[in-house]
Image (cartoon, rainbow, N blue to C red):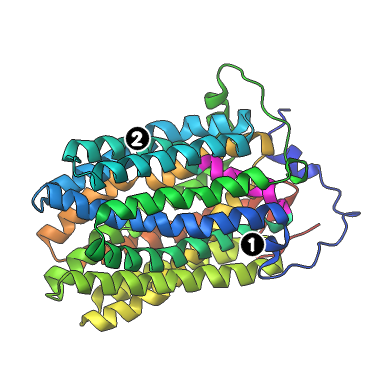
Amino acid sequence: MPAYAGGAETDQLDRNTAAPPPRRRMFGSLRVRNYRLYASGQVVSLVGLWMQRVAQDWLVLELSNGSPIALGIAAALQFAPTLFLSLWAGVLADRMDKRKLLLVLETGLGLCALTLGLLDVTGVVQLWHVYLLCLLLGAVSAVETPVRQSFVVEMVGRDQLTNAVALNSMTFNLARMVGPAVAGGLIIFVGTGWVFLLNAVSFIGVITGLLLMRAGELHRGDPVPREKGQLREGLRYVRKRPDLVILLSLVFFISTFGLNFYVTLAVLARNTFGGDASAYGLLSTLLAVGTLAGATLAARRSARGKPRLKLLIVGALAFGALEIVAGLMPTMWLSGLALIPVGIAMMTFTTTANATVQLAVSPAMRGRVMGLYMLVFLGGNPLGGPVMGWLAEHFTARAPMVVGGVVSIVAAVVGGLVLARRGGITLTGYRLRRRARVTR
């Protein structure tokens, strides 16, 4: 039987003699030196990332005389590489030393920001420069994301993986609240170019953290030797695991049709509530408050142990129902306040799904499976975005949130029933069961 067969993985653990799990804490991952170095650099770098996103959008609008089409082209160029590179990035993650690979990739991201900043502050930047750098940034990010995701378990080990995923989400959403606000003030006083340069400087923290890590303390598996057909091998691995197929399908439907806020919030603020950019900012901020709270709760729950199937399905159901409620609220403030629990439910689902997928796969396959995970998580945007935009244009701005909520509920019900009938999701040495018990 192949080394990646689900049953073989489960049999590897002697449930009768397994030692009791160590005591877990809400911030337990930060007790690990390597992860502490990584997280410290990420705090600074992610704020810079969100600053760059705001500054980049503003620069495109300035160079194109306010053209929404130009803004859409820039977004498409930055996203498109994910469709073509994320699976191959997973192969690289399995073959190579992830820490060294991340050092190269983080340096590449920093150089993209530095180049755009220098072009801008010297006054020579043109729209095609931004387009080209969006494409380069997207290509590097498409490789960096699966590698970074699969590197987390090497830093903290299996027992702390769920906690580390939740803490990463906390950091990301905290930066999501701080970065745009800082960027808005800096753009007014010093212009967009200096925002890009500050983002380039922020990568020093991430690179320094990676360099200071103790390689001997990483939880590494044996690297996969370079062979032909490794991408197909990864896809076959997933195909032979119906539990993973169902879980990834659930992630695809919810991320494609439910997580459509980049389309819905701006249209809802302007067309339904008659607001301006500040109204859009308010709705985005309230959603970010919810996602930060959800990530904090996820970190707190992680102290209890492995992710739970019941929590995964309940989070998906709650997200769909709350999204419908938020879309039907009569006023902007009520809709915004309803987005806070939407954000909590969204993070409950996404953090649980991420940790479950990583724990459900063989270490030799983790990079390739996480590449596929990022593809289904982000790859549906070219489909979901136009569909939700069409609904908003031909029906009402509330329609995308209502339809997205309905699709999420249906996907959660179907996925939950199928997984429950199968008995759960096979983890490496565990079984994630319907009644949220981990048997040993």
Taking the image as drawn, is residue 318 in sight? Answer: no
User: Which residue extends farthest top?
Assistant: 228
Q: Amino acid at mark 1?
A: Asn
Q: Is residue 163 magenta?
A: no
Q: Is residue 40 left or right of residue 414?
A: right
Q: Quadrant of residue 274?
A: bottom left
- Is the C terminus in the top left, top right, bottom left or bottom right quadrant? bottom right
The percent position of residue 226, horizontal first and vertical second, equals 62, 19
Secondary structure beneath label 2 = helix
Mark 1 or 2: the one toward you = 2
Judged from this view, the residue extending furthest toward the left is 65
| Residue 268 as seen in the image, left or right of residue 111 | left
User: At numbered mark 1, what does the secondary structure look like: helix, strand or loop?
Assistant: helix
Q: What is the x, y in percent for residue 4?
A: 68, 34
Q: Is residue 127 visible?
A: yes
Task: Give above or below for 312 relative to 365.
Answer: below
Extent of the magenta region: 146-158
Horizontal relation, residue 30 to residue 165: left or right: right
Is 48 or 69 nearer to us in this picture? Answer: 48
Q: Residue at x 41, y 56 (%)?
A: 48
Q: Which residue is mark 1?
A: 163
- What percent of the width, then of the height, locates residue 432? 66, 56
Q: Quadrant of the N terminus?
A: top right
Residue at 34% in and 45% down = 380
How many discs appear? Answer: 2
Residue nearer the viewer, 420 or 37: 37
Q: In the visual, does 362 lie left or right of 103?
A: right
**In front of the other: 237 or 53:** 53
Q: Is residue 154 magenta?
A: yes
Residue at numbered disc 2: 136
Q: Give the main secondary structure of the magenta stretch.
A: helix
